[in-house]
Image (spheres, rainbow, N blue to C red):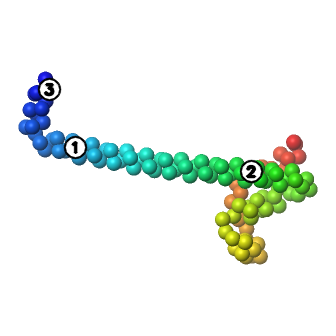
Amino acid sequence: MLSTLIEKIEDAPRESLFLAVVLVVIGGLLSAMYMVCDAQTRQAHQRQALLETQRLAVLDCLSSDPHTSYAACRLEVAQRFAPQGEDAMSAEASTGQTSAHQVTMLVPVAYYALR
């Protein structure tokens, strides 16, 4: 049985070359898909960790000063977690544009009041 299979492969070298090329292409596609999925998973884990840290920072801000508003804590956390330097943050603050929209873990002030 194996000898007949080997004879067929020897009789048709183009088919075996085609199969080898197809297997290499499939292997390349699978490895590329793995690399893309792995990179996206790592980025998702990093974003999730950052959001959790920001959420805890806002809650810490709210618990440290009970008279502060959620918007003030959110702005403070956004300035603390901004990837830009102090100069860029002060320039944004003077123009009224802040990166507070980057703090996306919206916890309403009523949540703090209910605790």
Give me the C-alpha separation between circle 3 and circle 2.
65 Å
Please tell me in which quadrant of the rendered image residue 82 appears: bottom right
Q: Is residue 109 left or right of 4 when viewed as pictured?
A: right
- Sequence order check, earlier mark of 3 and 1: 3
Give me the C-alpha separation between circle 3 and circle 1.
19 Å
- For label 1, the crowd category at 10 Å Cα-Cα, with few meaning under 14, some 14 to 19 and many 20 or more, is few
Q: Mark 3 = which residue?
A: 2
- Sequence order check, earlier mark of 3 and 2: 3
> Where 91 falls versus 104 (above or below)?
below
Q: Mark 1 = which residue?
A: 20
> Where 12 falls versus 106 (above or below)?
above
Q: Residue at x 12, y 32 (%)?
A: 6
Disc tally is 3
User: Could you tell me which secondary element the residue under label 2 belongs to?
Assistant: helix
- For label 3, the crowd category at 10 Å Cα-Cα, with few meaning under 14, some 14 to 19 and many 20 or more, is few
In percent of width and height, residue 86 lies at 72, 72
Q: Mark 2 = which residue?
A: 55
Please report contact status of discs 3 and 2: CB closer than 8 Å, yes or no: no
Give me the C-alpha separation between circle 1 and circle 2.
52 Å
Which is nearer the eye, 18 or 64? 64
Amino acid type of the residue that numbered disc 3 sits on in the rendered structure? Leu
Q: Residue at x 56, y 52 (%)?
A: 43
Amino acid type of the residue that numbered disc 1 sits on in the rendered structure? Ala
Mark toward the viewer: 3 or 2 = 3
Q: Residue at x 88, y 46 (%)?
A: 113
In percent of width and height, residue 2 lies at 14, 26
